[in-house]
Image: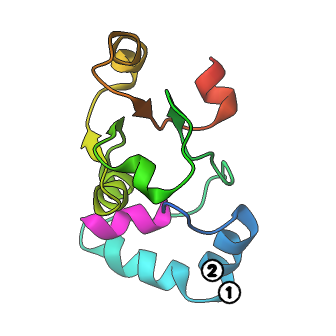
Amino acid sequence: HPAWAYFTSVPFGLTASEMSAWVHHMGGQELWDELASDYGLKCLPAGNTGVQMGGWFNKEINSPDDLKGLKMRIPGLGGDVMAKLGASPVSLPGGQIYENLVSGAIEATEWVGPWNDYA
């Protein structure tokens, strides 16, 4: 269900503090419970990686026009957003990102954040 993305990773979304406030004090948990009940689940926050960077690019991005036609590994809701900005989202497993960047098959990628990207 597309709504799951709102509880995990919304592009240009909330900070860790804002997300916690929304879930705990502004109705987020109730919406999560409603969504999860269709699957017999009870979801609870189990940590927050915080704000993530926008991605790794093989060229400088100075305006939305620089995204037009850009082949970027970015799945899900993030890919939907980038497509609206003119990029060409590509879905690849994490283990194939490096080889596809080096070969030029993709020109940019989004992963988790600096610590995971470095690993």
Q: Farthest residue toward the right?
A: 17
Residue at the (70%, 74%) spot, across then down: 18
Q: Residue drawn 44% across and 68% down?
A: 6
Q: Position of residue 118 (x, y in %)?
A: 65, 20
Q: Which residue is mark 1?
A: 25
The residue shown at (30%, 55%) is 86
Q: Main secondary structure of the magenta part?
A: helix
State which quarter of the image contains the C terminus: top right
* Residue 5 is a magenta residue: yes
Spot occupied by residue 15 in the image (x, y as percentages of width and height):
69, 65
* Amino acid type, label 1: His
Element type at marker 1?
helix
Residue 42 visible in the current orientation: no
For the residue marked with disc 2, what is the amino acid?
Trp
- Alpha-carbon distance for marks 1 and 2? 6 Å
Residue, far bottom: 26
Residue 36, image x and y in percent? 34, 70
Instruction: Indicate the quadrant where residue 45 lies.
Output: bottom right
Locate the N terminus and report the quarter of the image it occupies.
bottom left
Residue at label 2?
22
Residue contact between numbered discs 1 and 2, judged by CB atoms under 8 Å = yes
Q: Which mark is residue 53?
A: none
- Answer left or right for 74 relative to 50: left
Q: Is residue 100 visible?
A: yes
Magenta stretch encompasses residue 95: no
Q: Of residues 25 and 87, which is closer to you in this image?
A: 87
Which range of residues does the magenta coloring cover?
A: 1-9
In the foreground, 52 or 37: 52
Q: Residue at x 68, y 86 (%)?
A: 25
- In which quarter of the view is residue 44 placed? bottom right
